[in-house]
Image (tube, grey):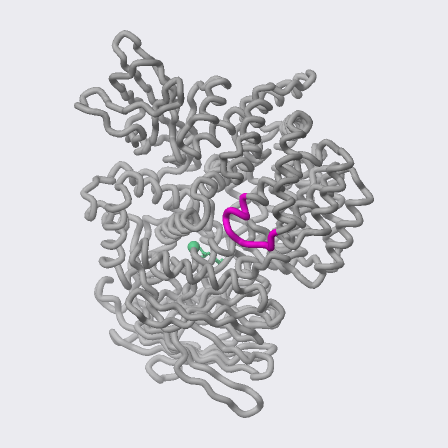
Amino acid sequence: MRTEQPKMIYLKDYQVPDYLIDETHLTFELFEDHTLVHAQLVMRRNPDAGAGLPALVLDGQQLELLELKLDDRVLGAADYQLTDSHLTLQPTQEQFVIDSSVRIHPESNTALEGLYKSSGMFCTQCEAEGFRKITYYLDRPDVMSTFTTTLSAEQHRYPVLLSNGNPIASGSEEGGRHWATWEDPFKKPAYLFALVAGDLWCVEDRFTTMSAREVTLRIYVEPENIDKVQHAMDSLKKSMKWDEEVYGREYDLDIFMIVAVNDFNMGAMENKGLNIFNSSCVLAKAETATDAAHQRVEAVVAHEYFHNWSGNRVTCRDWFQLSLKEGFTVFRDAEFSADMNSRTVKRIEDVAYLRTHQFAEDAGPMAHPVRPDSFMEISNFYTLTVYEKGSEVLRMIHTLLGPQLFRKGSDLYFARHDGQAVTCDDFIKAMEDASGVDLTQFKRWYSQAGTPRLEVSESYDAAANTYRLQLRQSCPATPGQAEKLPFVIPLELALLDAQGRELPLQLVGEDKPVGTSRVLQVTQAEQAFTFVNIAEQPLPSLLRGFSAPVKLSFPYSRDQLMFLMQHDSDGFNRWEAGQQLAVQVLQELIGQHQRGELLVLDPRLVAALRSVLENDSLDQAMVAEMLSLPGEGYLTEISDVADVDAIHAAREFARAQLAEALFEPLWARYQANREVSRNTPYVAESAHFARRSLQNIALSYLMLTGKPQVLAAALEQYEACDNMTERLTALAVLVNSPFEAEKAEALKAFAEHFKDNALVMDQWFSVQAACTLPGGLARVQALMQHPAFTMKNPNKVRALIGAFAGQNLVNFHAADGSGYRFLADQVISLNATNPQIASRQLGPLTRWRKYDASRQALMRAELERILASGELSSDVFEVVSKSLA
Ligand code: 0A1
Ligand code: ZN
């Protein structure tokens, strides 16, 4: 908790560290009521800093200093200054050794940062600035050191003792205690340090690297979860192979370990050789985890593994460069997932997520560039912008350079900067040097916040056989950035003829066509491209594969969108055409609702989805994606003033009408797929994901008709399936239905069956929190009293409170402000125990400018109430104060 107003930290103030730490030797004595940490730091003056011997300022918070030595001389209180965040002393030589002993209290650490206990085990989370809660240190990523770590604990309670690197010694002590020493030969910043002590079981496997080195792989979990680890292990081996094949990156230690913990603020953490995971991102088996959960495990295992190079071997100079490792690693894991599953479906999911959530962030009070230039609390900058938009920026570089030159740039980056802490500029420079492409203007994607708009218009000259696309780009103002300069926007496009065939693309001045689908570079605020030899008025397929994170507009008619849905050879754009058609139709319904008119659904949407459903040659996952109407969150994002009730009413009306009109083909698809599912054991592979996703979306439409045979089908699926994907959807459709008795029975049976499985209970909470039927807040408040719920566990908070505020928009935005009041109460309570989680729950309130005047006033009032509620953490203070500014 802060004692004074948090200060803003600026990128422009960056200075190299005065001192470096070459070696770090740590000893942890873990006890039930305290932990003793001894740190020996072998230090020297940084030759890159100025002359002289400035004071040494070590970071340290919530530490009880027991002893401090400088080169073996015990220092007295007069030899150093201590504040609640720093320890300052005066070195007398260029090279010296600091020894410190401190006492800390992991057993009462509820913030889950630094060393803490989760379900009886000790574990750590040091990114970004948690190491300073473990010992006095230069806790900044550009100070890189080798580490040796010895930990000792009671053998019976903590039989497994782990840290980074390779194990080098272990033994027993008097009094039932034991110890182990680990050595990590690779220099790393303190944020990659990790330690685990617990009663854990592991699954072990091996991987032979490209240079024939043998690596031991271990995944540690609580004994009762040992049956849920195989999918993560398979994912790890696939990731290791993929990184060798696609990026030429080989693993470097003799052992790679993953540990699952139940209480974790984020998804997972890439500590060197010892990844620590939220158990929700490791554990997966058919009976307890959905297809989405299986895919998430695969993606997160890959993400953390890929960090071994993009993040660990080459790390960030300072936290403003966070996207250097995160944007790159998200891009790498997205490509991995695309290679393991359906590429088009992965792209659709990522784009839908980006447009709903990152675009909203980029348009709100916390908007910041991919490389922010200031922050108060770095924990608030693990954002969709740094991660997902950062990944889009990498994807654009990949598009502009092409795969070969991109790989050459990546090789150069890793070779040039191995063992260093570097900047986004260093990354770009490597890409430029390897490819010869000038990325000077492109770099604006790193420094300018906000989502660019790209307006496109056309003109066809039948006499000259030319087709001209006129482009205009702009970017709205964001906090601290009123004016924006033009971006480099890679615009992939094709022109389709009346039969849907791609036309050869030849620009004025070119002597021959250059393919039929190509990437144009939009670099100016206004720009035109003229194509020649175009014998008929074409229909453009624009921004194929979502080649840039922009808001594109083109005046498509509904008939043209239907044509693209059927004929565009770019799978992503076929889906996109369907989404745009649905948006047009839904916006029309929203208008009707607002004017108090009778709602009338454009029959073209029914016809379009009918032809998708009846097209047996389409990938089933694509059919499922195309049947999914744009979400309420996305419809909110694209509204100037979001009318929550009208959006909900319009979308539900459209869903119900589609369900009635398409009952036959939906029922046929449902029955055929359920039949296969019934007779096929669960497999976590993309063809099976596809079948179940179509089956499940069909069921959710069908249930809206209220027909008895559908209720019977939902109950059959709920009771007879062998996997969580089918069971959870069946539960969700019952929960959202008017069949009260069946709903109550299913919820009860589910909770009874899975009461001992926390991750499954999270899903049970979420399904109910997201139910949009009236009375949502009362249901959530009642669920907070359920014995399986606790505010101490971040997964529970996200499952219940996060799902309510983030997904259940009609209930959260109740006109009386009750949802806002509830969320503010939870934030105030979490602020005292876990500031990172408190701050993350604030998201929905920060978007107050999107709503009508009455809701705006209510939301603002809750933000004001939080601000006045007492001692705020820097995390919550930053978000609330920026939201009100
Ligand atoms: N580097 C991790 C994310 C992470 C960040 C902060 C954490 O604690 C506050 C934990 C994990 C990743 O990208 O996976
Ligand atoms: Zn990451």
Query: Where are the magenta residues, as a range?
Result: 680-690
Residue 246: x and y in percent read: 32, 53
Q: Up-down: is 289 above or below 777?
A: below
Picture residue at 64% right of the left edge, 60% below the top: 792
Residue 550, x across and y down, in percent: 41, 32
**Residue at left 72%, top 43%?**
714
Compared across the picture, whether 864 is left or right of 180 comes to right
Q: Where is the N terminus found, in terms of image quarters?
A: bottom right
x, y percent for residue 561: 47, 22
Q: Is residue 42 left or right of residue 777?
A: left
Numbered label tally: 0
Q: Position of residue 173 (x, y in %)?
A: 51, 90
Residue 593 vertical placement versus 847 (above, below): above
Residue at left offset 57%, top offset 72%: 121
Residue 626, above or below 745 = above
* Residue 545 appears anywhere in the view: yes
